[in-house]
Amino acid sequence: MINLILKDIKLAQKMNIFIVIYALFIAGMGLSVSNYLAASLFYILGMNILIFVSVIYTNGYDDKYKTEIILNSLPIDRKNIVRGKYIALIIFIIVGCGVIVLWTNIISLLGIIEGGKSADIWSIIFVTNIVLLFYSIYYPIYFRMGEGIRSFNAIIWVLVMTGPGIVSKLMKVLEGTGYLEKIMSMDINTINMYFLPISVIIYYLSMRVSERIYMKRKF
């Protein structure tokens, strides 16, 4: 299973450098915003870009080169194939969030961009909840359909690339309707903290479901 995890990590390292630069640029925009909520949205978006693209790239590689068929022809427990994907995602979360936090703190310390607060642990927790819940739904479908989910990956890719524009428009709409002020008055950090263990449990249950699905799948 360790080799399966390392495979995905090595593939993610081959991700287009321009995607990484794009994510760092989006995160850097957050430092120019004085509103903490607005800045956090940019940090969250930057983290999600790195994580989602890592998964899309590694899974896309597996689909393109029929990696699943090769792996299932080897004496490898199918459960380990599933667990490898789930654990690799955890590593992508740690690395993706860590890069954005490190990047924004360095920029802030150097004084290159002034205005906003750098990314912190609360952004990481929020992203972790989003990613775990999303892939708790995505992976059971992925292990059921395999290549059939390629079109869905393309939709995710488009959403990731158009994310900054969507966030900017959303912020303007919320500000114009007065909802932005109401959201800022909520204790979102506490809600996220309490929701984290729930996300982890759901993610674990999703892995167990994916294992059962994959064990019955025919190649």
Image: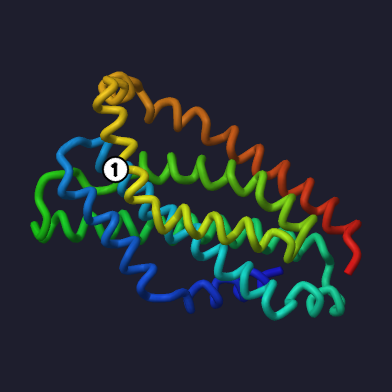
Task: Judge whether 26 appears above or below 124 on screen.
Answer: below
What colour scheme does the image use? rainbow
SS for callout 1: helix
> In the visual, does 108 lie left or right of 3?
left
Towards the viewer: 149 or 144: 149
Residue at 67% over, 44% down: 137
Image point 31% across, 40% down: which residue? 169
Q: Quadrant location of the N terminus?
A: bottom right
Count residues near mark 1 (Cα–Cα under 10 Å), then give few for <14, some for 14-19, many for 20+. Answer: few
Q: Quadrant of the C terminus?
A: bottom right
Q: Could you say where residue 40 lies in the image, as x and y percent from the top left?
A: 30, 42
The number of numbered badges drawn on the structure is 1
Please provide percent x and percent y for residue 204.
68, 44
Please report the residue visible at 29 percent of the width from the left and 56 percent of the height from the top.
Answer: 26
Q: Could you tell me the amino acid type at mark 1?
A: Ser
Task: Work out whether residue 12 or residue 171 is closer to the camera in this orientation and state it.
Answer: 171
Residue at 29% x, 43% y is: 168
> Is 208 left, or right, of 96 in this rendering?
right
Q: In this view, does 81 lie to the left or right of 57?
A: right
Front residue of this view, candidates 112 and 110:
112
64 vs 45, left or right, is right
Q: Above or below — where is 66 with respect to 41?
A: below
Q: x, y percentage for residue 111?
A: 8, 57
Q: Nearer the viewer, residue 210 or 196?
A: 210
- What residue sits right under mark 1 in the picture? 168
Rendered location of residue 32, percent (x, y)? 15, 49
